[in-house]
Protein backbone atom coordinates (compact mmCIF):
# COMPACT_ATOMS: atom_id res chain seq x y z
CA UNK A 1 0.00 0.00 0.00
CA UNK A 2 1.10 3.59 -0.68
CA UNK A 3 2.88 4.94 2.43
CA UNK A 4 0.40 3.19 4.69
CA UNK A 5 -2.63 4.20 2.61
CA UNK A 6 -5.33 3.27 3.31
CA UNK A 7 -4.87 3.11 7.08
CA UNK A 8 -8.62 3.36 7.83
CA UNK A 9 -11.95 2.63 6.16
CA UNK A 10 -12.87 4.50 2.97
CA UNK A 11 -16.28 6.19 2.56
CA UNK A 12 -18.17 5.78 -0.73
CA UNK A 13 -20.89 8.43 -1.08
CA UNK A 14 -23.96 7.31 -3.05
CA UNK A 15 -26.01 10.31 -4.25
CA UNK A 16 -29.22 8.31 -4.62
CA UNK A 17 -31.48 6.64 -2.06
CA UNK A 18 -31.00 3.25 -0.41
CA UNK A 19 -32.54 0.35 -2.32
CA UNK A 20 -32.32 1.93 -5.77
CA UNK A 21 -30.16 0.49 -8.54
CA UNK A 22 -27.29 2.97 -7.98
CA UNK A 23 -27.25 2.11 -4.27
CA UNK A 24 -27.40 -1.63 -5.06
CA UNK A 25 -24.53 -1.47 -7.54
CA UNK A 26 -22.46 0.67 -5.11
CA UNK A 27 -22.90 -1.74 -2.19
CA UNK A 28 -22.25 -4.82 -4.28
CA UNK A 29 -19.14 -3.27 -5.85
CA UNK A 30 -17.52 -2.73 -2.44
CA UNK A 31 -18.87 -5.81 -0.66
CA UNK A 32 -15.49 -7.57 -0.91
CA UNK A 33 -13.38 -4.39 -0.88
CA UNK A 34 -11.44 -5.40 2.23
CA UNK A 35 -9.90 -8.20 0.20
CA UNK A 36 -8.42 -5.65 -2.21
CA UNK A 37 -7.80 -2.57 -0.03
CA UNK A 38 -7.11 -4.13 3.39
CA UNK A 39 -9.87 -1.90 4.80
CA UNK A 40 -13.64 -1.69 4.34
CA UNK A 41 -15.33 0.69 1.93
CA UNK A 42 -18.53 1.91 3.59
CA UNK A 43 -21.43 3.27 1.52
CA UNK A 44 -23.12 6.44 2.81
CA UNK A 45 -26.26 7.78 1.07
CA UNK A 46 -26.44 11.56 0.64
CA UNK A 47 -29.52 12.32 -1.43
CA UNK A 48 -31.30 15.35 -2.85
CA UNK A 49 -31.06 17.87 -5.67
CA UNK A 50 -31.27 15.22 -8.42
CA UNK A 51 -28.03 13.72 -7.07
CA UNK A 52 -26.23 17.10 -6.79
CA UNK A 53 -26.10 17.00 -2.95
CA UNK A 54 -24.16 13.73 -2.82
CA UNK A 55 -21.94 14.43 -5.82
CA UNK A 56 -21.22 17.92 -4.48
CA UNK A 57 -20.21 16.39 -1.13
CA UNK A 58 -17.64 14.24 -2.93
CA UNK A 59 -16.23 17.19 -4.90
CA UNK A 60 -15.77 19.28 -1.73
CA UNK A 61 -14.50 16.48 0.54
CA UNK A 62 -10.96 16.51 1.92
CA UNK A 63 -8.71 15.22 -0.91
CA UNK A 64 -6.96 12.55 1.17
CA UNK A 65 -8.32 9.51 -0.68
CA UNK A 66 -10.65 8.46 2.13
CA UNK A 67 -13.79 9.84 0.46
CA UNK A 68 -14.87 8.70 -2.99
CA UNK A 69 -18.25 8.81 -4.68
CA UNK A 70 -20.50 7.19 -7.21
CA UNK A 71 -21.17 9.77 -9.92
CA UNK A 72 -24.08 9.31 -12.33
CA UNK A 73 -25.59 10.53 -15.61
CA UNK A 74 -27.13 13.66 -14.05
CA UNK A 75 -23.62 15.09 -13.58
CA UNK A 76 -23.47 15.47 -17.39
CA UNK A 77 -26.58 17.70 -17.38
CA UNK A 78 -26.32 20.02 -14.34
CA UNK A 79 -24.31 22.82 -15.98
CA UNK A 80 -26.10 22.53 -19.33
CA UNK A 81 -29.54 22.73 -17.67
CA UNK A 82 -28.56 25.56 -15.32
CA UNK A 83 -29.13 23.44 -12.21
CA UNK A 84 -25.63 23.48 -10.67
CA UNK A 85 -22.06 24.36 -11.63
CA UNK A 86 -20.93 20.80 -10.94
CA UNK A 87 -19.38 18.73 -13.76
CA UNK A 88 -16.90 15.89 -14.23
CA UNK A 89 -14.14 18.52 -14.27
CA UNK A 90 -14.59 18.95 -10.50
CA UNK A 91 -13.37 15.40 -9.77
CA UNK A 92 -10.40 13.10 -10.09
CA UNK A 93 -11.95 10.28 -12.11
CA UNK A 94 -11.38 6.67 -11.01
CA UNK A 95 -13.37 4.52 -13.43
CA UNK A 96 -16.55 4.06 -15.40
CA UNK A 97 -18.60 1.18 -13.95
CA UNK A 98 -21.77 0.85 -15.97
CA UNK A 99 -23.56 2.08 -19.08
CA UNK A 100 -27.26 1.40 -19.71
CA UNK A 101 -28.71 2.13 -23.15
CA UNK A 102 -32.21 3.31 -24.00
CA UNK A 103 -34.75 1.17 -25.82
CA UNK A 104 -37.19 2.68 -28.30
CA UNK A 105 -40.34 0.56 -28.09
CA UNK A 106 -43.86 0.34 -29.44
CA UNK A 107 -46.82 -1.81 -28.40
CA UNK A 108 -46.94 -5.19 -30.12
CA UNK A 109 -50.04 -4.12 -32.11
CA UNK A 110 -48.51 -0.82 -33.30
CA UNK A 111 -48.86 0.08 -36.98
CA UNK A 112 -45.10 0.77 -36.93
CA UNK A 113 -42.73 -2.17 -37.01
CA UNK A 114 -39.42 -0.39 -37.64
CA UNK A 115 -37.69 2.72 -36.30
CA UNK A 116 -37.60 4.13 -39.85
CA UNK A 117 -41.41 4.06 -39.96
CA UNK A 118 -41.58 5.89 -36.61
CA UNK A 119 -39.08 8.51 -37.79
CA UNK A 120 -40.66 8.97 -41.24
CA UNK A 121 -44.21 9.64 -40.01
CA UNK A 122 -43.49 12.92 -38.12
CA UNK A 123 -41.60 14.33 -41.09
CA UNK A 124 -45.01 14.68 -42.78
CA UNK A 125 -46.92 15.04 -39.49
CA UNK A 126 -44.68 17.00 -37.04
CA UNK A 127 -45.57 16.86 -33.33
CA UNK A 128 -48.22 14.14 -33.77
CA UNK A 129 -46.25 11.08 -32.62
CA UNK A 130 -46.32 10.89 -28.80
CA UNK A 131 -43.20 9.61 -27.04
CA UNK A 132 -43.44 8.68 -23.35
CA UNK A 133 -40.41 8.98 -21.04
CA UNK A 134 -39.63 9.04 -17.31
CA UNK A 135 -38.66 12.68 -16.82
CA UNK A 136 -37.58 15.79 -18.71
CA UNK A 137 -33.81 15.95 -19.11
CA UNK A 138 -33.32 12.33 -18.10
CA UNK A 139 -31.19 9.88 -20.06
CA UNK A 140 -34.12 8.17 -21.78
CA UNK A 141 -35.83 11.44 -22.81
CA UNK A 142 -32.59 12.87 -24.21
CA UNK A 143 -31.58 9.62 -25.93
CA UNK A 144 -34.47 9.85 -28.38
CA UNK A 145 -34.41 13.68 -28.49
CA UNK A 146 -30.80 13.48 -29.68
CA UNK A 147 -31.72 11.13 -32.54
CA UNK A 148 -34.78 13.23 -33.44
CA UNK A 149 -32.66 16.42 -33.55
CA UNK A 150 -30.03 14.82 -35.76
CA UNK A 151 -32.77 13.77 -38.22
CA UNK A 152 -35.01 16.88 -38.08
CA UNK A 153 -37.90 14.98 -36.53
CA UNK A 154 -40.44 16.58 -34.17
CA UNK A 155 -42.01 14.31 -31.55
CA UNK A 156 -44.57 15.21 -28.88
CA UNK A 157 -42.85 14.23 -25.61
CA UNK A 158 -45.01 13.03 -22.70
CA UNK A 159 -43.37 12.77 -19.25
CA UNK A 160 -44.31 10.11 -16.69
CA UNK A 161 -43.17 9.50 -13.13
CA UNK A 162 -40.89 6.56 -13.88
CA UNK A 163 -40.72 3.55 -16.19
CA UNK A 164 -43.77 1.69 -14.81
CA UNK A 165 -46.41 4.29 -15.83
CA UNK A 166 -44.60 4.81 -19.16
CA UNK A 167 -44.95 1.10 -19.91
CA UNK A 168 -48.62 1.10 -18.83
CA UNK A 169 -49.38 4.05 -21.13
CA UNK A 170 -47.69 2.30 -24.06
CA UNK A 171 -49.61 -0.96 -23.58
CA UNK A 172 -52.84 0.99 -23.05
CA UNK A 173 -52.45 2.88 -26.32
CA UNK A 174 -52.14 6.28 -24.61
CA UNK A 175 -48.75 6.97 -26.24
CA UNK A 176 -47.31 5.81 -29.56
CA UNK A 177 -43.71 5.17 -28.52
CA UNK A 178 -41.82 4.68 -25.24
CA UNK A 179 -38.20 5.45 -24.48
CA UNK A 180 -36.94 3.59 -21.39
CA UNK A 181 -33.95 1.67 -20.16
CA UNK A 182 -33.87 -1.48 -22.28
CA UNK A 183 -33.80 -3.64 -19.15
CA UNK A 184 -37.07 -2.03 -18.01
CA UNK A 185 -38.81 -3.61 -21.03
CA UNK A 186 -37.51 -7.14 -20.44
CA UNK A 187 -40.70 -8.70 -18.98
CA UNK A 188 -43.12 -7.07 -21.45
CA UNK A 189 -40.83 -7.95 -24.34
CA UNK A 190 -40.64 -11.60 -23.26
CA UNK A 191 -44.44 -11.63 -22.90
CA UNK A 192 -44.82 -10.38 -26.48
CA UNK A 193 -46.59 -7.16 -25.42
CA UNK A 194 -44.01 -4.74 -26.78
CA UNK A 195 -41.74 -4.60 -29.78
CA UNK A 196 -38.32 -2.99 -29.27
CA UNK A 197 -37.39 -1.15 -32.46
CA UNK A 198 -33.79 -0.35 -31.50
CA UNK A 199 -31.28 -0.08 -28.67
CA UNK A 200 -29.55 3.32 -28.54
CA UNK A 201 -26.02 1.95 -28.41
CA UNK A 202 -23.07 1.03 -30.61
CA UNK A 203 -23.43 -2.67 -29.72
CA UNK A 204 -26.39 -5.00 -29.26
CA UNK A 205 -27.53 -5.81 -25.71
CA UNK A 206 -26.66 -9.36 -24.55
CA UNK A 207 -30.18 -9.93 -23.15
CA UNK A 208 -31.78 -8.73 -26.42
CA UNK A 209 -29.46 -10.12 -29.13
CA UNK A 210 -32.07 -9.78 -31.89
CA UNK A 211 -32.78 -6.07 -31.25
CA UNK A 212 -30.82 -3.88 -33.70
CA UNK A 213 -28.54 -1.06 -32.64
CA UNK A 214 -29.60 2.47 -33.56
CA UNK A 215 -27.16 2.39 -36.49
CA UNK A 216 -28.44 -0.98 -37.70
CA UNK A 217 -31.95 0.50 -37.56
CA UNK A 218 -30.78 3.19 -40.00
CA UNK A 219 -29.81 6.09 -37.72
CA UNK A 220 -26.07 6.23 -36.96
CA UNK A 221 -25.34 7.85 -33.59
CA UNK A 222 -21.59 7.86 -32.79
CA UNK A 223 -22.09 9.31 -29.27
CA UNK A 224 -25.30 7.71 -27.98
CA UNK A 225 -26.73 9.16 -24.77
CA UNK A 226 -26.34 6.42 -22.18
CA UNK A 227 -27.29 6.28 -18.54
CA UNK A 228 -23.99 5.78 -16.71
CA UNK A 229 -22.38 5.32 -13.32
CA UNK A 230 -18.76 5.70 -12.31
CA UNK A 231 -16.40 6.38 -9.44
CA UNK A 232 -14.56 9.60 -8.66
CA UNK A 233 -12.57 11.27 -5.90
CA UNK A 234 -12.18 14.94 -5.00
CA UNK A 235 -9.65 16.90 -7.05
CA UNK A 236 -6.23 17.06 -5.43
CA UNK A 237 -5.88 13.52 -4.05
CA UNK A 238 -2.13 12.72 -4.14
CA UNK A 239 -1.10 10.75 -7.22
CA UNK A 240 0.17 7.72 -5.26
CA UNK A 241 -3.14 7.46 -3.38
CA UNK A 242 -5.12 7.81 -6.63
CA UNK A 243 -3.14 4.86 -8.02
CA UNK A 244 -4.16 2.75 -5.00
CA UNK A 245 -7.83 3.73 -5.51
CA UNK A 246 -7.74 3.03 -9.26
CA UNK A 247 -6.12 -0.39 -8.84
CA UNK A 248 -8.26 -1.38 -5.85
CA UNK A 249 -11.59 -0.45 -7.42
CA UNK A 250 -10.65 -2.20 -10.67
CA UNK A 251 -10.22 -5.38 -8.57
CA UNK A 252 -13.64 -4.75 -6.99
CA UNK A 253 -15.06 -4.33 -10.52
CA UNK A 254 -13.49 -7.64 -11.63
CA UNK A 255 -14.79 -9.47 -8.52
CA UNK A 256 -16.91 -12.47 -9.65
CA UNK A 257 -19.64 -11.81 -7.07
CA UNK A 258 -20.09 -8.23 -8.30
CA UNK A 259 -20.16 -9.28 -11.95
CA UNK A 260 -22.72 -12.02 -11.24
CA UNK A 261 -25.14 -9.64 -9.53
CA UNK A 262 -24.80 -7.00 -12.25
CA UNK A 263 -25.68 -9.65 -14.85
CA UNK A 264 -28.74 -10.72 -12.85
CA UNK A 265 -29.90 -7.09 -12.69
CA UNK A 266 -29.35 -6.70 -16.43
CA UNK A 267 -26.84 -3.88 -15.82
CA UNK A 268 -24.22 -3.87 -18.58
CA UNK A 269 -20.81 -3.37 -16.97
CA UNK A 270 -18.40 -1.19 -18.90
CA UNK A 271 -14.94 -0.42 -17.51
CA UNK A 272 -13.02 2.65 -18.60
CA UNK A 273 -9.87 3.91 -16.89
CA UNK A 274 -9.65 7.61 -15.87
CA UNK A 275 -8.53 8.76 -19.33
CA UNK A 276 -11.16 6.71 -21.18
CA UNK A 277 -13.82 7.80 -18.68
CA UNK A 278 -12.96 11.46 -19.28
CA UNK A 279 -13.17 11.04 -23.07
CA UNK A 280 -16.58 9.37 -22.70
CA UNK A 281 -17.89 12.21 -20.50
CA UNK A 282 -16.60 14.89 -22.89
CA UNK A 283 -18.40 13.19 -25.79
CA UNK A 284 -21.55 12.84 -23.65
CA UNK A 285 -21.73 16.62 -23.07
CA UNK A 286 -21.20 17.32 -26.78
CA UNK A 287 -24.19 15.08 -27.60
CA UNK A 288 -26.35 16.37 -24.74
CA UNK A 289 -26.08 20.05 -25.67
CA UNK A 290 -28.08 19.92 -28.95
CA UNK A 291 -30.49 17.35 -27.44
CA UNK A 292 -31.28 19.63 -24.48
CA UNK A 293 -31.63 22.63 -26.80
CA UNK A 294 -34.15 20.75 -28.96
CA UNK A 295 -36.47 20.15 -25.98
CA UNK A 296 -36.05 23.64 -24.47
CA UNK A 297 -33.93 22.57 -21.49
CA UNK A 298 -30.57 24.09 -22.45
CA UNK A 299 -29.79 26.86 -19.95
CA UNK A 300 -26.00 26.68 -19.62
CA UNK A 301 -24.22 28.12 -16.57
CA UNK A 302 -20.91 29.89 -17.01
Image (cartoon, rainbow, N blue to C red):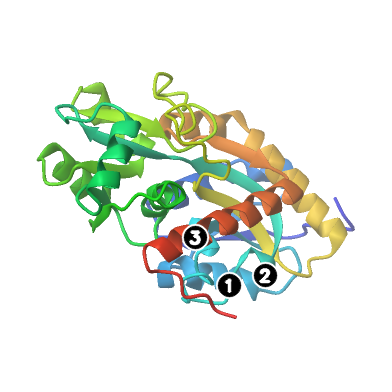
- Judge whether 146 appears above or below 102 on screen: below
As drawn, the residue found furthest toward the bottom would be: 302
Q: Nearer the viewer, mark 2 or mark 3?
A: 3
Residue hosting label 3: 290
Please say if the residues under marks 2 and 1 sit with CB atoms less than 8 Å apart.
yes
Asked whether the beta carbons under mark 1 and mark 3 sit within 8 Å of each other, the answer is no
Q: Quick one: label 1, few (<14), some, or many (20+) residues within 10 Å?
A: some
Task: Identify residue for label 2.
Answer: 90
Circle 1 or circle 3, nearest the eye:
3
Which residue sits furthest top? 210
Report which residue position mark 1 lands on.
86
CA gap between label 1 and label 3 equals: 19 Å
Q: Residue at x 85, y 50 (%)?
A: 1
Residue 33 visible from this viewpoint: yes
71 sits to left or right of 3: left
Q: Determine whether 255 is above or below 144 in the image.
A: above
| Residue at the extreme right | 3
Image quarter (top left, top right, bottom left or bottom right) of the C terminus: bottom right
Q: Residue at x 52, y 49 (%)?
A: 228
In this rendering, would 55 be left or right of 103? right
Amino acid sequence: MSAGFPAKDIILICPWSAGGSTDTISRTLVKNAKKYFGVNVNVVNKTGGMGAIGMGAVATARPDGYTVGMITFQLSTYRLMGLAKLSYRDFSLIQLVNQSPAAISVAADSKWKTLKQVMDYPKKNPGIVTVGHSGAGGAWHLAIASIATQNNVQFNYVPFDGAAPTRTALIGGHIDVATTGIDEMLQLYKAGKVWILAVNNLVRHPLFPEVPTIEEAGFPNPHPILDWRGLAAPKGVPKDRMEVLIKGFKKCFDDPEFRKLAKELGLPLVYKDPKGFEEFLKGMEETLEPALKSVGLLKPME
